[in-house]
Image: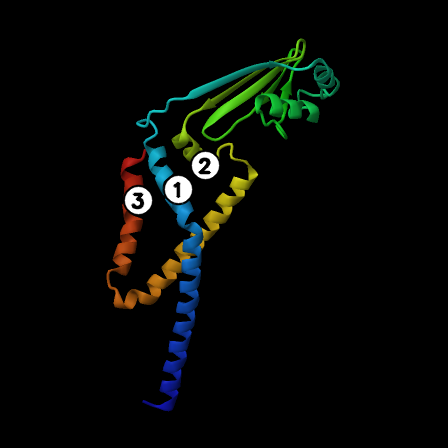
Amino acid sequence: MSETSRTRNLSDQNQRAFWLKHLHRWHWISAGLCLVGMILFAATGITLNHAAQIEARPVVIQKEATLPADLLASLSAAAPKGDTGELPPAVEHWLASELGIVAGGQIAEWSDDEVYVPLPRPGGDAWASIDREDGKVLYERIDRGWISYFNDLHKGRNTGAAWSWFIDVFAGACLVFCLTGLCLLQIHSGKRPATWPVVGLGVVVPLLLAILFIH
């Protein structure tokens, strides 16, 4: 073997080693970041697919109270010009301390008779209403259980900005995991003849199912 060929082979081996090192590094880092999320999303994918067969027994909690006169007056004074607006901070604090209602930042619906505060949440629903005449407060919370809660996390339903950001970061990490895995498959495919037939099967099966059985 000539010196030129030996140098070229050494260069190819060094380049291969470089890419293997970095691909393996990013593959295991992204795998670590995705691990718990992938388990959660895979499990809830099954529960969502069989939602009709999984019986939910909602638990309904109702509470009543009366808003103090001074807070009722401040509520009237803080009425927005339109049909929607936030509650006064003092009223939000009273709702939290008396009834455990976290209404901070929620946009309430104001009418001549009442103030309605929607309180959507994963795994259930909730709302509160305040009578603008006598200050009567009604609160109802519906809890559909842990399966419903995790299903809503899967869908990003009523989960807030922080969880929405987590889903975006998790999806990015999954892309890194899959793409680095694809590159590793390419590098090792020469010694593993079944690599691309298996990959092709993973493409063809869902494609055929979609074409033949989804209408």
User: In this rendering, would 107 be left or right of 142?
Assistant: right
Question: x, y percentage for residue 85?
Answer: 67, 24
Q: Picture quarter containing residue 75?
A: top right
Residue located beneath label 3 in the image: 206
Q: Quadrant of the N terminus?
A: bottom left
Q: Amino acid at mark 2?
A: Leu
N-term mark: 3 or 2: 2
Q: Quadrant of residue 183?
A: bottom left
102 and 17: which one is in front? 102
Q: Which residue is under mark 1?
A: 40
- Residue 150 x, y percent position in the rendering: 42, 35
According to the image, label 2 marks what residue? Answer: 153
- Residues under labels 1 and 2: Cα distance? 9 Å
Look at the numbered disc 3 and give the secondary structure of its residue.
helix
Residue at 48 percent across and 44 percent down: it is: 167
- In percent of the image, x 40 and y 50: which residue is there? 35
Alpha carbon distance from label 3 to label 2? 25 Å
Q: Secondary structure at mark 1?
A: helix
Q: Would you say the residues marked 1 and 2 are in contact, meaning their CB atoms lie under 8 Å apart? A: yes
Q: Hey, which residue is sitting farthest right in the picture?
A: 77
Residue 172 shown left or right of residue 137 in the figure: left
> Tag 2: Cα neighbours inside 10 Å, few (<14), some, or many (≥20)?
many
Q: Secondary structure at mark 2?
A: helix
Going by the numbered disc 1, the residue's amino acid type is: Leu
Looking at the rendered structure, the kind of residue marked 3 is Pro
Furthest residue to the top? 134
